[in-house]
Image (tube, rainbow, N blue to C red):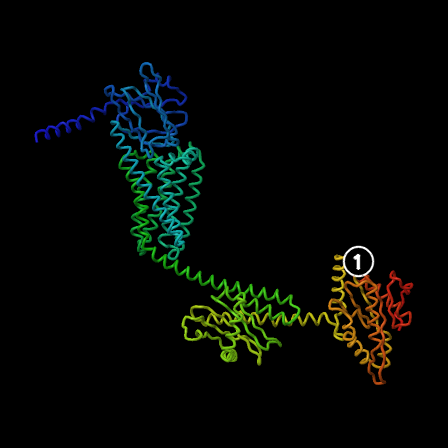
Amino acid sequence: MIRFRVTLLIALCALIAAPSLFAAARIELARLDASMDLAEVLQQDGAFEAVSDDRIVLEPQQGSRYWLRIEPMQEPGRTQVLRLDRVPVSRLVAWYDPLPGEAPGELIDSFLAPPSGEPLRSDFSLPLRDARRILVAIDPLLPATVSWSLGGEREALIASRGAGNLAAASYAAIFATALVSLALTLAVREPAYRDFTAFAVLAGGFLALAQGHAFELPLLGPLLGAWGIGVLWMAAALCAASALSAAQGLLGLSGRAPALVRVARALVWTLAGFGLLLGILPATVHAQFAPAASAVLSAGLLLPVLATGWGWAHGARPAAAQCLMWAVFWLAATSQLALLSGWLADSGGLAWLQQGGTALAVLGLSIALTDRVIALRQRAEAMQALHASSSAVLRIEQKRRELVETLEASTGTAVEPSDLEWRAFRQLLVVLPDVLPLRAQALTVSGYRGFDYLLAEPMKEKPRICALLADRSSTLKGICRARTAMSLPPEGADPAGPRLGVVPLPVPRPGWGALLLERQEGAFATEELELAGEFAELAFKAVEQGARAVELKRRAETDPLSGMLNHRAGEELLDSQLRAARHAGEPLGVLFLDVDLLRTVNERFGMAVGDHFLRSLGGNLRPLLRDDDLMYRHGGDEFVIVLPGLGIEQSEAVAERMRAQVASQRFRSEQGPIKITVSLGVAALQPGDESARRLVERAARATEMAKGQGRNQVARAKGFGASAEAPDAPPIF
């Protein structure tokens, strides 16, 4: 017990004696010309004045520099540490008196470009070794009130680590909150959380810049230091702008006070513009107008407090807690601005307010927002459901449009009416699985436009569909006659069998048709069957429109009297045949047929006889032609026959058979049977024939030659062994 009391007494004496052991040092301050070097400063003993308290006021002035002279008074072998507040200085250089045989020692530090070493420092630490004198040159960037203290190395290390731990904890809390808010922003797409995320990041950034910790970052720190002290003021202004934006967004003022929101947005942009202006101003301007800038920014930081106070007064439920947190943040940020303007000196308590207060405000605001998460989630789920519904409708409309476009394209190229139906029905079966969950689909039509159809998709399901139609034929016909879509239960006793949906098709009676839909699970809803019916109606409308288009095209291209192609359509086909023959290097024969004395026949026996002859001419001559041969009415009693792949000799043989076929026919009239003959000119493709019209003209001249030789003749065009070409003269009847 006695030993314990003695030990305790020795410890108390040591604690009492410790301050006196390390507090002995004389500190003097001078403001000298910045051009003086160290040797000249050492000669200015009269310019130094003793510092009477623990604070030093620094006022930046161009062309001058502050010098500190410290005379340690501790015993040799002991080391004291002089700790100066870490205020914005462009350069801090310390020189130590050398010991015998040593060069002068030098220590360089800076607020904007700190040396590598212990991170998250809160002060400039200058060790006073072996009772040597030290001179410190300081170039302040902004007005500052610097507090200093002397202590032992262990005390300085404990204080430095404590300040670093406080800063690390504050930054961790701020940026972790920002990450959580960012995650919520991405999850619920809420602008309020987006604004709060921006505020949390900028609040942490401003704190790190004001404390000088941002300049310690690798890669980014040198860039910020090169920018200069303007980046700090810009961060403060942007932080104030983001705080106001976050405050009005978190309160939801857009629905309650749109006028106030407009004012707030204008102030946000004003603060942001003010910050950008501060960011580009030179350092000398910052030093001159730092107090004014601090006052403006402090007022800007007070705006969120006023906005939330207004919301609290008007019954906004979360506004009370938010107003308290914004007030805490305003105190923390304003104290930091006061420190940068030289109105306050740094201290441990001030660091707790600045760092801890900022972290507490950010955390408190995030907690105050938790009651919005459920409402936001519900709204997001409702929006997702609406989006999913809209997407489904959009997908159906897109498939509907694609079906219409595909049907128009496919039916537009169809030639035969039966081809129209097949293409449209096949396209309908292909597109249905894109809008409905189906395992198989089929279409059966009986008596539609004179044809029966049975199509299935996939094709391998066609035998099973045929068996199904055989088993349920009467049921399907009854559903189609009732014109009511139905979902049928599975076949047999197996309740897990495939479900069948039957959609009647708009087939005119006595015909009938059905669209059969099949899937494994779940009966077809009425909406699904109606949707399938709408798509089926599109297919049938496309068929009807395509059939009308084919008929109109046929009428436009057909001569109404002879039933052959008319002049325009025939000449277009002849042009294509001529190009194909020239490209392939194959022969092409052309016959020009002219009815002999048709005008005389019409005058003597009547127009009906002549028209009857023209109507029957195609039927009489078509058996003599191949499928690829072309015959069209050139005009009046003139016709052109195109013979692909035939030369002049073969074409002449075909013309002779035609002449003989017509000459062998007899046609009825009121005066009895009469004989009508034709004359034909034969021409073949030659290298000089650049157009179909030139080829037809040569064949027409040959026809004139045949008429001149007595009619009912076949003549070759000039250049193929025929007699001299007849002169240009009207046809001989």
Q: Which residue is more in the foreground, 22 or 670?
A: 670
Does residue 403 appear in the picture of this structure?
yes
Give residue 710's position: percent from left, percent from top: 91, 72
Give residue 382's position: percent from left, percent from top: 39, 61
Does residue 483 appear in the picture of this structure?
no
The residue located at (61%, 75%) in the rendering is 451
Q: Residues within 10 Å of mark 1 (few under 14, many from 20)?
A: some
Residue, far top: 100
User: Is 72 positioned to the left or the right of 525 in the image?
Assistant: left
Give residue 673's position: percent from left, percent from top: 84, 83
Q: Which residue is mark 1?
A: 690
**Label 1 is placed on what type of residue?**
Glu
User: Is 57 positioned to the left or the right of 267 in the image?
Assistant: left
Determine whether 43 is above or below 516 in the image.
above
Where, by quadrant of the figure, is residue 357 drawn?
Answer: top left
Q: Tell me the element at label 1.
A: loop
Where, by quadrant of the figure, is residue 688 drawn?
Answer: bottom right
User: Is 59 positioned to the left or the right of 536 in the image?
Assistant: left
**Image label count:** 1
Give residue 372's position: percent from left, percent from top: 34, 55
Image quadrant containing the C terminus: bottom right
Where, by quadrant of the figure, is residue 604 drawn?
Answer: bottom right
Determine whether 313 is above or below 153 in the image.
below
Q: Which residue is more in the foreground, 445 or 385?
A: 445
Image quadrant containing the N terminus: top left
Determine whether 154 is above or below 675 in the image.
above
Q: Which residue is more in the foreground, 384 or 561?
A: 561
